[in-house]
């Protein structure tokens, strides 16, 4: 019976490892575009490294980009800034 318990715990560890590897891959994919968005908005690109923080990292980045004033100013919604 103890072999069954150790097998279940081993399987749980393997699932946890797979989830962590999946999170790391998704975070690496999101870091590059978020880095560009942050630098264009005037923030440090290193802010995008918060994607590596599980669960709350992406929410911190979204909150900073959504609720803080951008140092480079916000887009005014025009397609091109030329004369009218």
Image (cartoon, helix red, strand yellow):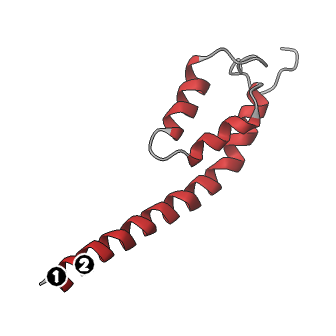
Could you classify mark 1 by the number of other residues whose Cα lies within 10 Å: few (under 14), some (14-19), or many (20 or more)?
Answer: few
Q: Is residue 5 left or right of residue 30?
A: left
Task: Establish if 13 lies above or below 50.
Answer: below
Task: Establish if 79 lies above or below 37.
Answer: above
| Percent position of residue 69, x then y | 66, 14
Q: In the image, which disc is placed on residue 2?
A: 1
Q: Where's the N terminus, which quadrant? A: bottom left
Q: Quadrant of residue 55?
A: top left
| Percent position of residue 45, x then y | 75, 37
- Residue at 53% x, 26% y: name it: 63
- Residue at 73% x, 22% y: name it: 78
Which residue does the numbered mark 2 point to in the structure image? Answer: 6
Which of 77/10 is in front? Answer: 10
Query: How far apart are the alpha carbons under marks 2 and 1?
Result: 6 Å
Q: Is residue 15 left or right of residue 74?
A: left
Task: Establish if 7 lies above or below 20.
Answer: below
Q: Where's the C terminus, which quadrant? A: top right
Element at label 1: helix
Q: Is residue 6 left or right of residue 47?
A: left
Q: Quadrant of residue 17?
A: bottom left
| Percent position of residue 82, x then y | 87, 20
Which of 60/40 is in front? Answer: 60
- In contact (CB < 8 Å): disc 2 and disc 1: yes
Element at label 2: helix
| Percent position of residue 60, x then y | 53, 31
- Residue at 56% x, 58% y: name it: 24
């Amino acid at each position: 019976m103890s072999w069954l318990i150790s097998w279940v715990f081993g399987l749980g560890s393997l699932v946890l490892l797979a989830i962590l590897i999946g999170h790391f891959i998704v975070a690496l994919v999101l870091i590059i575009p978020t880095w560009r968005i942050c630098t264009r908005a005037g923030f440090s690109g290193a802010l995008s490294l918060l994607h590596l923080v599980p669960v709350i990292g992406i929410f911190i980045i979204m909150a900073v980009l959504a609720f803080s004033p951008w140092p480079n100013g916000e887009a005014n919604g025009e397609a091109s800034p030329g004369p009218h």
